[in-house]
């Protein structure tokens, strides 16, 4: 894939108002307009087998999103914005990430603190531990 291909796909993501697009074998297997981590969590829950070897285009990739991509065994990630810890954990799991910009931490919406999902991810021992903690949190949110 040439640089212009992935850059065009990220531009289209933005233009279409999408937060994430996941492709495999040239086909879109999942896309969403929902913010934050919910789309990736939903895709993992509903299409886990299809995620293996897929390419993810995501607006923001922090450690939390990285952990979900590791569990889903994605092949590569393209994003305009990634955190240093996301890049680090993805590298440990041999998942290629191409970020437009790298920042120290993903912040919350009003930029006053670290994103709650990042905090949760940093408090966990690894991808599976985070996924279990996230499932508990998501189940609590649905009540």
Image: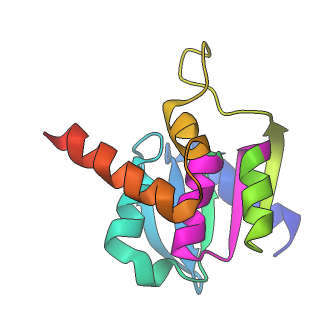
Q: Quadrant of the N terminus?
A: bottom right
Residue reaching furthest left? 143
Query: Is residue 68 inside the magenta stretch?
Result: yes
Q: Which residues are magenta?
A: 63-84
Check the image and report above or below for 132 versus 137.
below
Foreground: 44 or 34?
A: 44
Percent across and percent down for residue 17 are 49, 42
**Is any part of residue 25 visible from this angle?**
yes
Percent across and percent down for residue 62 are 65, 45
**Is any part of residue 7 visible from this angle?**
no
User: In the image, is 83 to the left or to the right of 49?
Assistant: right
Residue at left 13%, top 39%? 143
User: In the image, is 116 to the left or to the right of 7?
Assistant: left
Check the image and report above or below for 16 versus 129.
above
Residue reaching furthest right? 3
Residue 5 found in image quarter: bottom right
User: In the image, is 131 to the left or to the right of 79?
Assistant: left
Residue 101 found in image quarter: top right
Percent across and percent down for residue 73 are 58, 77
User: In the image, is 91 to the left or to the right of 38?
Assistant: right
Check the image and report above or below for 101 versus 125.
above
Percent across and percent down for residue 80 are 73, 45
């Amino acid at each position: 894939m040439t640089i212009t291909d992935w850059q065009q796909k990220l531009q289209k993501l933005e233009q279409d108002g999408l937060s994430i697009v996941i492709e495999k074998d040239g086909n879109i297997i999942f896309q969403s307009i929902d913010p934050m981590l919910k789309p990736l969590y939903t895709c993992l829950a509903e299409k886990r087998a299809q995620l293996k070897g897929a390419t993810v285009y995501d607006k923001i990739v922090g450690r939390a999103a990285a952990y979900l991509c590791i569990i889903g065994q994605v092949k590569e990630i393209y994003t305009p914005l990634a955190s240093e810890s996301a890049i680090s954990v993805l590298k440990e799991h041999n998942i290629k990430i191409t970020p437009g910009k790298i920042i120290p931490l993903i912040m919350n919406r009003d930029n006053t603190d670290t994103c709650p999902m990042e905090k949760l991810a940093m408090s966990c021992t690894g991808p599976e531990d985070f996924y279990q903690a996230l499932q508990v949190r998501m189940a609590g949110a649905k009540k």
